[in-house]
Amino acid sequence: MLKKNKGKGSDRKIVELNKENMKKIRWLITFAVILYVGVQNLDVVLKYVNVLWGLLLPFAIGGALAFVLNVPMAFIERHLFGKAREKEGKAGKAVNRLARPVSLILSIVMVVLVVLVVVLVVAPELGRTLVSVVKKVEEDIPLLQKWLTDTFQSDSEIVKWASTIEIDPQKSIDSIISVLKNGADNLVSSTITVTMGLVSMAVNFAIGFVFACYVLLQKERLGKQVLKAAYAILPVKIVEYLGHVCTLASKVFASFITGQCIEAVILGSMFFVSMTIGRFPYAMLIGVLISFTALIPVFGGIIGCWVGFFLILMVSPLKAFAFLALFVILQQIEGNLIYPHVVGNSVGLPAIWVLVAVTLGGNLMGILGMLIFIPLVSVLYTLFREWVYERLDKKKVKIS
């Protein structure tokens, strides 16, 4: 608390150290000491952080699963049981008891079916595609050798190198077998390590799945318990602000996930239908591939486009360039007509910040970072904008 005393033409500030200020100073000193000790013993801190992360990993996986499954579960519960839950009497109570478990089961079945359909469609098609691509490359090697020889007749080194180009699948298989035989000892230990890793991953996923189901079935009750504990420990203003942040984050993340999935399915379907009508090769494979890559904001569709281009290029160069033209047309239709209506401004983030979020997320966490950072940056952007407008209102400053 600051008091101003005026005397003899000069102002003096007297700081009154009350109990609240002393408490803040103690907390500040404690934090500074802990931070200093942590920096000085960074290796030990990181070791314990890794141990703690290993213990919390199943619950982190469960939280992520719960958040993703909550989107279709809430939709099913709202649209399938919404009116029935309003009924009074035994029928209404029975519906209320069954609505959540049935919605959760239907959501899990839907996700599993989508994964199975994709695997059953993509895996065989991908295998056939790889075989045909290898055969096509093997058939085109003589043509490449002839073109290099005719084009660079004066350069004996290039002609000599061209004559040595060959792709023999049997030789490649023999080389792989030889490598496996030579590294048999290492292979055993590697197999044990990989097996242990897979078992650990499966156990973590199983625990996370059970935790996710429990959270989804009891989410209102758990929410009330967390809220009670927060109000008991923290000041009211902080709890209210944290509640606002959590509500905003949940809304933004859910809208982003829903919008991206719907947009990816629509874009993949457009490619499959148009490529089938145009008799492009690998229509199903490229359609599914673009559906998956389109989940990655900004760059996802482009990645799928170039993979599809090179696959088609092995079959027909003319069709490959026609595919690029088709991609540009469908991207324009999707970006200008479909995306604004399906996703709209669900994340409320300007285009330049979307690009920044995708770039930062990709550099820090790869593909997962690209998916997470857009809604995360959107939440931070919204909170910062609210803080700026609040400060401007206090200062009574209006900028049009």
Image (cartoon, grey):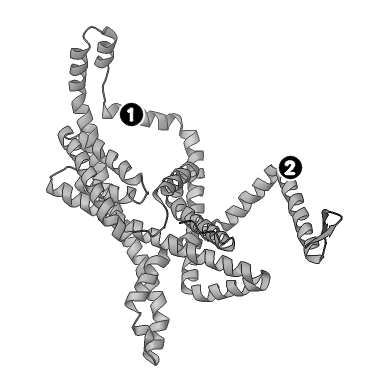
Q: What is the CA distance from the residue labelled 1 to the residue labelled 2?
A: 53 Å
Give the left or right position of residue 158, taking residue 176 as reference. left
Query: Picture coordinates of residue 99 (x, y %)?
Result: 39, 78
Asked whether 97 or 142 is in front, the reply is: 97
Query: Picture coordinates of residue 29 (x, y %)?
Result: 78, 53
Give the foreground label among 1 and 2. Answer: 2
Query: What residue is at 18 percent from the left and 27 percent from the top?
Result: 139
Q: Which residue is mark 2?
A: 40
At mark 1, the secondary structure is: helix
Q: How many residues crowd around disc 1 within 10 Å: few (fewer than 14), some, or many (20 or more)? A: few
Asked if residue 41 shows in the view, the reply is no
Badge 1 amino acid: Asp
The image quadrant where one finds the N terminus is bottom right
Query: Picture coordinates of residue 114 (x, y %)?
Result: 31, 59
303 vs 163: above or below: below
Give the left or right position of residue 380, taking residue 21 as reference. left
| Residue 174: mark in rendering | 1
